[in-house]
Amino acid sequence: MEVEVTPAATNVYAAVFTACILKRTETMLARVKQTGPILPAATLKPALLLLNYAWRVAEAWPGVRDLLLLMAPKMEQAGYRDEWLPYLEQGIQSGQQLGDLQAVAELQLQVGLLYQLRSKYAEARTYLEASAAGFEQLNLPLGQAKALNRLAYVARLQRRFEEAAQLVEMAGQLLEKDNLEWAYNYFVLGLIALDKRNWLEANNFSKKAFSLWEQKDDQRMMGRSLITVAAALLPMKEYQEVTAVCQQAITLFEKIQDPFYQAIAQMHLGNAYLSLTQPLEALRLYLFAERIFQQTQEQLRLAHIHNNIGIAYRQLQQWDKAAEAYLSSIKQYRELGNIVLMVDAADGLGLVYLEQGQLLKAIATFKEALNQLEHIKDEPGYKHLLDVITPHLREASAQLGNKNE
């Protein structure tokens, strides 16, 4: 016998479902607030399951919104990228439908950060620009400044240094003098100085950022600032200080359970060991970091680490492994459009061929690197790379000439 479901019964079921979702959302919010920087599986799984159903209940939106914004930094820190994006994008859609424009701007900022971490810079820019515009429309200068600062970080990754500096300046104009968001300004300025090989300036800006983040005990950003300090100190040959700074950063990231940035700090510590001609110790750190970057699908960091692995294997005279690592790095940098770092990796590959006596391959590799370098004459790093690669080409050509005599 079929049971007829009346409109009244349907309304009762809907009311019960709504009440259940509201209660579970409230409970889940309380649970997530009590967790540390990483959500345990016992909380994460039911939270995601709840979100899959809670979209259907308009009355639950305030709690759903708060849950999304509370979970977002925890999910990013845990290394979730593609798995978490659909939830944020659904949140944006719901916020737009319900007219919650502040939530939309906040969620667009989070999506932009995830795309940046996936090295998808065009998508990151789209969301961060929309976030900045949304905050501006709502007359929320702090939110707008945050979005502009993160957009500046993406511009810097794209080597658009003038644009990055302009965005940082625009963000600064929106901030009160004592606002701790200034730390992110200094952080980005330190990275721009690093890319321009202004080591002292990079060091100073990064230490300023560290001091501000220390005031709010933001250990993650403290650690990230220390990484930039280490990167600036390395070419200054302050190896002992580099080692100490990297260890300090690693300790911070271990404390907050952040494997991604811990891997980056270990990569920089490996760079110090490379500079001290200790390739085995460097390689141990690099291979650990490589696994983390593969898990998070972080293409830029993978390109970095493969270049460094190439250097380590070259120091060990393991030529095939060195060439394989350099070729991987070159491919990834090319896909990212980073010609400066692609050329640097190509120089390393040329040295592998040179040191093996494969002179024709070495010459061809150095010449192609110099050809690529011509496309970026106005970029920071051009003259340095020109001065490095030209003698390598000259040496390979001389050896070939002597061999043919």
Image: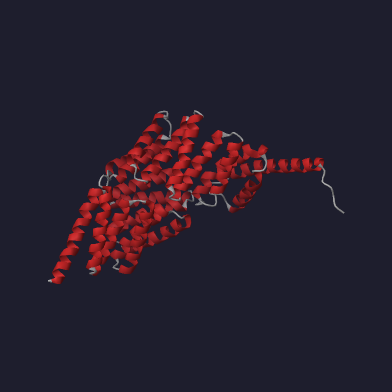
Circle count? 0
Residue 134 % position (x, y) = 50, 34
Q: Nearer the viewer, residue 24 or 215?
A: 24
In the image, 300 versus 214, the foreground residue is 300
Where residue 152 sits: x, y (%)? 39, 40
Q: Is residue 291 left or right of residue 395?
A: right
Up/down of 98 relative to 404, above or below: above
Q: Which of 42 and 354 is in front in this view?
A: 354
Give coordinates of residue 2: x percent, y percent: 85, 52
Q: Quadrant of the C terminus?
A: bottom left
How has the structure been colored for display? secondary structure
Residue 207 seen by the camera: no
Where the N terminus falls, by quadrant? bottom right
Q: Which residue occupies 49% across, 37% down?
A: 131
Residue at the spot x=15%, y=71% of the render? 404
What residue is at 33 percent from the left and 52 percent from the top? 243
Quadrant in the picture for residue 124: top left
